[in-house]
Image: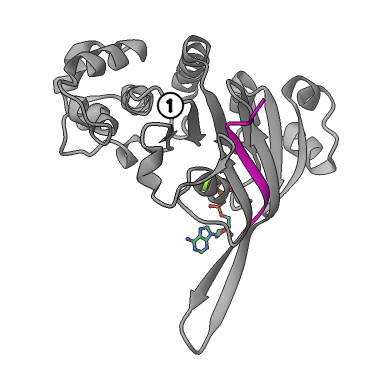
Amino acid sequence: MTPVLELDDVSVTFRMGGPLRRTSIRAIRGVSLRVDPGETLGLVGESGSGKTTTSAVALGLRAPTSGTVRFDGSPFPRRRRALAGRMQAVLQHPQWSLDPRMRIGASVAEPLAVLGGGDTAPQVAESLAEVGLDPSFAQRYPHQLSGGQRQRASIARALITRPPFLVFDEAVSALDVSVQAQILNLIRDLQEAHGFAALFISHDLGAVRYVADRIAVMRRGEIVETADAAVFYERPAHEYSQRLLEAL
Ligand SMILES: Nc1ncnc2c1ncn2[C@@H]1O[C@H](COP(=O)(O)OP(=O)(O)OP(=O)(O)O)[C@@H](O)[C@H]1O
Ligand SMILES: [Mg+2]
């Protein structure tokens, strides 16, 4: 089975500073992971451990300093547009994907634009219904929605092109606990219905437990453990994983 996503020995170094004083930060080092079709890999680790940098590489938004990335068995095309509709991201703050000045319907329809085609209204209505929002929400603005509804709309947007791969980066972290559970259940239901693969990133091991088939633990830019979720939550191998779980 060809993985949907494969990172092999990926490192990312950020270089900063002017001509006189230069520093560099190695955000991730030697990261190898794969996400198989239909599975969810949970990526956990404390703040600054390199999760978002890893997701940026996985989404083709940042080129690795070294190492290789394969999507559907091939290196990323040079023009990211060629991937349009095949991967999408759901981020921590819905305002990062929902423009406050645009109606929800227009934001949800946006990923379809690069694919071309005609009237998007029926697909928008279908996508909104799938995430539990009435089609009338298409006419509203983000500020007229609750936090949970906004995150549902972001998910509708991410799903509208039926991508085989989705990245969730702290997608429930900003929500109240009760709303978190609803959104996590929604993600699980949608995955059952559509069979997409996902990279689910969170510092919250409790949230990851709801959705992940396998877990990768990051610490200071490196993956220290990868395990089946069932095994991981019972018997974490790495001492750092044990500490994370004890804090839960
Ligand atoms: N654009 C950037 N320029 C310089 N350094 C960066 C940049 N982005 C991230 N870093 C650094 O890289 C390291 C990893 O950051 P990253 O955002 O990937 O961690 P994270 O696990 O997503 O953290 P969080 O849980 O807070 O979201 C950190 O030390 C961070 O300060
Ligand atoms: Mg992050």
Q: Residues within 10 Å of mark 1 (few under 14, many from 20)?
A: some
Direction from residue 229 to residue 212 in the image, left or right: left
The answer to whether residue 248 is seen in the rendering is: no
Does label 1 point to a residue whose CB lies under 8 Å from ligand 2?
A: no
Q: Position of residue 193 (x, y in %)?
A: 48, 10
Q: Classify mark 1: helix, strand or loop.
A: loop
Direction from residue 50 to residue 144 in the image, left or right: left
Direction from residue 154 to residue 71 in the image, left or right: right
In the rendered structure, which segment of residues is drawn in magenta?
1-11
Residue 7: within the magenta?
yes
Residue in view at x 54 percent, y 51 percent: 53
The answer to whether residue 2 is seen in the rendering is: yes
Asked if residue 198 is positioned above or below residue 62 in the image, the reply reads: above
Q: Position of residue 150 (x, y in %)?
A: 31, 27
Q: Position of residue 13 (x, y in %)?
A: 59, 64
The quarter of the displayed image where residue 130 is located: top left
Q: How is the image coloured?
A: one colour
Asked if residue 36 is positioned above or below residue 121 in the image, the reply reads: below
Quadrant of the image for the C terminus?
top right
Which three-letter amino acid code belongs to the residue tagged 1? Pro
Magenta part, dominant SS: strand
In this view, the residue farthest toward the bottom is 20
Q: Nearer the viewer, residue 76 or 187?
A: 76
The quarter of the displayed image where residue 236 is located: top right
Residue in view at x 48 percent, y 47 percent: 60
Residue 244: within the magenta?
no
Residue in view at x 40 percent, y 47 percent: 80
The residue pinned by badge 1 equals 163
Residue in view at x 58 percent, y 42 percent: 70
Asked if residue 37 is positioned above or below residue 51 in the image, the reply reads: above
Quadrant of the image for the N terminus?
top right
